[in-house]
Structure formats: structure tokens, C-alpha cells
Image (cartoon, helix red, strand yellow):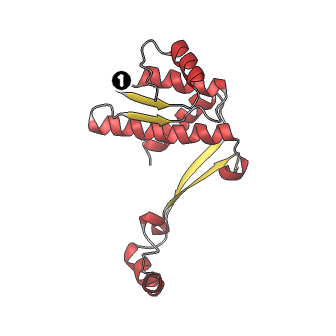
């Protein structure tokens, strides 16, 4: 988290083109009690439900914008920008620790993004990636125009 979070916030500001006051905190019940105690306290409920109700699979990221819940306050563009920032930060961390660029898959990325955010995203991808990038879109003309304007080399495959 200490390495990933600054990447997310930096990428968000780059993609959004503005400095929204975004906070992301990792929330875990393991912060308050040790795992063994949590499991013991949850045993009866776990037995009834046939699943474990405590542990890291129940951890969450709490995201706020201007100190308000992100889900309620953020626009579609802000939500998409944060989602891309999270995924691109994961890509950066993977590249750093694996020593090579993972394949970057970007599915229907231009939906609900204004042109400025699209341009920022393509600019980052073209400058920061040195491996294969697959982008899907439902609008051929939009994709062709954006790729032609912002990338020197690309291949368009129609299905």
C-alpha cells in the first residue's frame, strides 16, 4: 500500500487533469484484533453460514473525495479516472517487481470519459508502456481518430 497508493494518486491527477482531494485508506478488521481472536469470535457464525466471515478477503479500500464518500460524490469521469489509476498503478508495481512489462489490457476504456481524460490516458500509455497494449472500443471512428492523433504506431483489428 505504501508504494502503490502514491502511484494511484499521482496517476489519478494526471488522468483527471485536476487535483481532486482524494483519500484512499485500507480498512481491515485485523488492524484492531489478531487473526486468531477474530476467527474464534466468528466461529459460530462461520459454521452456520459455511464460510469464513473474517480475514483479508473482507478487507476494503475506503475512498473519499473532498472528505465525502467517493461512490456518492464522484462523477462518472472521476470514477473511471480512479479505476484506471488503480489498474495502471498495479501495472507499474508488477513491472517493477517482475522486471518486464506485463501486457496491458484496456477494455472499453473511452466510455464515459471526456476527451481530455481520453487524451491523458493515451498519452500516459504511449509514454510509459514499453510492452504490448490491447485496447477495445465499440466506436471504430473514435478509436482510429484518437490512436492516430496520439500514437505513432498501432495496429487496428476489426471483428
- Residue 122, given in percent of the width and then of the height, sits at 52, 23
> What residue is pinned by disc 1?
130
Tell me the residue at 45%/12% (across/down).
152
Tell me the residue at 66%/51% (across/down).
71
- Residue 113, given in percent of the width and then of the height, sits at 64, 32
Q: State whether residue 124 is above or below residue 88.
A: above
Say which of 114 and 6 sits in front. 114
Which residue extends farthest front?
A: 159
Please give left or right for residue 22 compared with residue 37 in the image: right
Disc 1 on helix, strand or loop?
Answer: loop
Crowding near the residue tagged with mark 1, few <14, some 14–19, many ≥20 C-alpha atoms within 10 Å = few
Say which of 12 and 45 sits in front. 45
Please give left or right for residue 72 compared with residue 105 in the image: right
Say which of 31 and 56 sits in front. 56
Tell me the residue at 42%/69% (across/down).
55
Q: In which quarter of the image is residue 75?
A: top right
Tell me the residue at 42%/30% (across/down).
134
- Residue 33, given in percent of the width and then of the height, sits at 45, 73
Q: State whether residue 35 is above or below residue 64.
A: below
Please give left or right for residue 153 compared with residue 85 in the image: left
Q: In which quarter of the image is residue 57?
A: bottom left
- Residue 159, given in percent of the width and then of the height, sits at 46, 30
Please give left or right for residue 63 compared with residue 132 in the image: right
Amino acid at each position: 500500500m505504501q508504494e502503490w497508493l502514491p502511484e494511484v494518486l499521482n496517476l489519478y491527477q494526471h488522468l483527471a487533469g485536476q487535483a481532486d482531494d482524494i483519500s484512499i485508506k485500507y480498512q481491515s478488521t485485523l488492524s484492531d484484533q489478531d487473526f486468531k481472536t477474530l476467527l474464534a469470535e466468528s466461529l459460530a457464525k462461520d459454521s452456520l453460514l459455511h464460510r469464513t466471515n473474517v480475514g483479508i478477503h473482507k478487507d476494503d479500500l475506503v475512498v473519499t473525495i473532498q472528505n465525502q464518500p467517493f461512490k456518492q460524490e464522484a462523477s462518472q469521469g472521476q470514477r473511471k479516472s480512479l479505476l484506471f489509476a488503480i489498474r495502471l498503478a498495479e501495472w507499474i508495481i508488477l513491472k517493477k517487481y517482475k522486471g518486464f512489462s506485463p501486457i496491458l489490457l484496456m477494455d472499453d476504456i473511452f466510455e464515459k470519459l471526456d476527451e481530455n481524460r481520453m487524451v491523458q490516458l493515451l498519452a500516459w500509455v504511449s509514454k510509459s508502456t514499453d510492452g504490448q497494449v490491447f485496447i477495445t472500443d465499440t466506436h471504430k471512428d473514435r478509436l482510429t481518430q484518437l490512436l492516430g492523433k496520439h500514437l505513432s504506431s498501432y495496429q487496428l483489428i476489426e471483428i
